[in-house]
């Protein structure tokens, strides 16, 4: 969430935690700190909420699923666009009830606002960080003529670089989710993604009145 003059950002953060202990734990906390592209700390470690709330039963009989959320402040953010894909690194740390570090991971993130605005002629337009943009996009299937649906990161990167050379700035998923590896590359190299939700359905039966 950016303020009106985009001089400060609130990062709405949700963290999922898997607890593989025999019994569900209590008192776990999650803290997040943010670093810029040069590795400089731009947001001190901030605790999300109070403590992680775990489910009472295991998921797939393997782990207790927990979740916690909160907001992290970033002052004077450098904003992400397809032309300037600036990424921060969020460091996410899990602590036990005594403050001992249990686990840590990181996630690269971009800061930007997305909105619909109306131009002088009354037409609705898409805006990134308050500025109108035009999408030049393609439908993208993660597919290789030799390896099929098994696509290497090198091949994904080759496709993205070719798109950038052709002034393509957006891709649409083909009715199914794109891989996180491809989405991470879109973040890094500057590609807008239209994530098409697969909400279509097929009939359970095609026998006239029995068709559903």
Image (cartoon, rainbow, N blue to C red):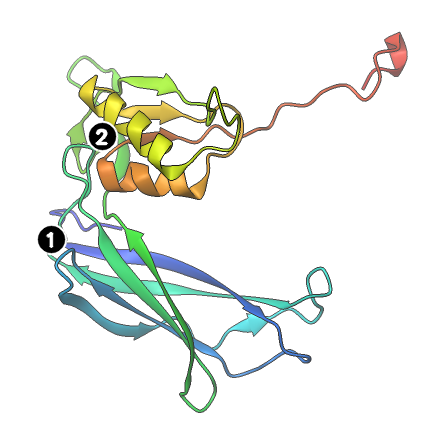
Q: Is residue 50 visible?
A: no
Secondary element type, mark 2: strand
Image position of 111 with respect to 160: above or below:
below
Left or right side of 8 for 59: right
Image position of 163 with respect to 188: above or below:
above
Residue 208's quadrant in the figure?
Answer: top right
* Residue toward you, 65 or 209: 65
Secondary element type, mark 1: loop
Categorize mark 2 by other alpha carbons within 10 Å: few (<14), some (14-19), many (20+): some
Categorize mark 1 by other alpha carbons within 10 Å: few (<14), some (14-19), many (20+): few
Q: Residue, x 20% and y 33% (percent of image)?
A: 82
Q: Residue, x 37% and y 59% (percent of image)?
A: 13
Number of marks in the rendered image: 2
Task: Return the residue at label 2.
Answer: 127
Q: Residue, x 44% and y 31% (percent of image)?
A: 195
Residue 6: where, in percent of width, then height?
14, 48
Residue 152: where, in percent of width, then height?
42, 36
Task: Return the residue at label 1.
Answer: 7
Residue 73 disc label:
none
Asked whether the residues under the numbered discs 2 and 1 touch, taking CB atoms below 8 Å apart as contact, a structural biologist would say no
Among the two numbered marks 2 and 1 on one chain, the one whose residue lies closer to the N terminus: 1
Left or right side of 141 for 154: left
* Residue toward you, 182 or 53: 182
Image position of 175 with respect to 30: above or below:
above
Q: CA distance from mark 2 to mark 1?
A: 17 Å
């Amino acid at each position: 969430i950016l303020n009106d003059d985009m001089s400060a950002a609130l990062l709405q953060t949700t963290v999922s935690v898997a607890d593989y202990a025999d019994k569900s734990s209590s008192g776990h906390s999650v803290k997040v700190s943010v670093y810029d592209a040069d590795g400089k700390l731009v947001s001190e470690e901030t605790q999300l909420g109070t403590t992680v709330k775990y489910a009472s039963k295991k998921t797939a009989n393997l782990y207790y699923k927990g979740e916690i959320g909160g907001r992290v402040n970033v002052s004077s953010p450098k904003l992400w666009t397809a032309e300037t894909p600036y990424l921060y690194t969020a460091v996410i740390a899990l602590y036990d009830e005594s403050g001992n570090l249990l686990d840590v991971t990181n996630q690269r993130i971009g800061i930007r606002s997305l909105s619909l605005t109306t131009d002088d002629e009354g037409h609705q337009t898409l805006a990134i960080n308050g500025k109108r943009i035009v999408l030049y996009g393609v439908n993208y299937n993660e597919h290789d003529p030799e390896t099929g649906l098994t696509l290497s990161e090198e091949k994904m990167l080759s496709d993205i670089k070719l798109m950038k050379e052709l002034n393509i700035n957006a891709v649409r998923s083909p009715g199914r989710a794109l891989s996180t590896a491809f989405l991470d590359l879109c973040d890094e190299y500057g590609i807008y993604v239209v994530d098409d939700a697969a909400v279509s359905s097929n009939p359970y039966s095609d026998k006239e009145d029995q068709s559903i």
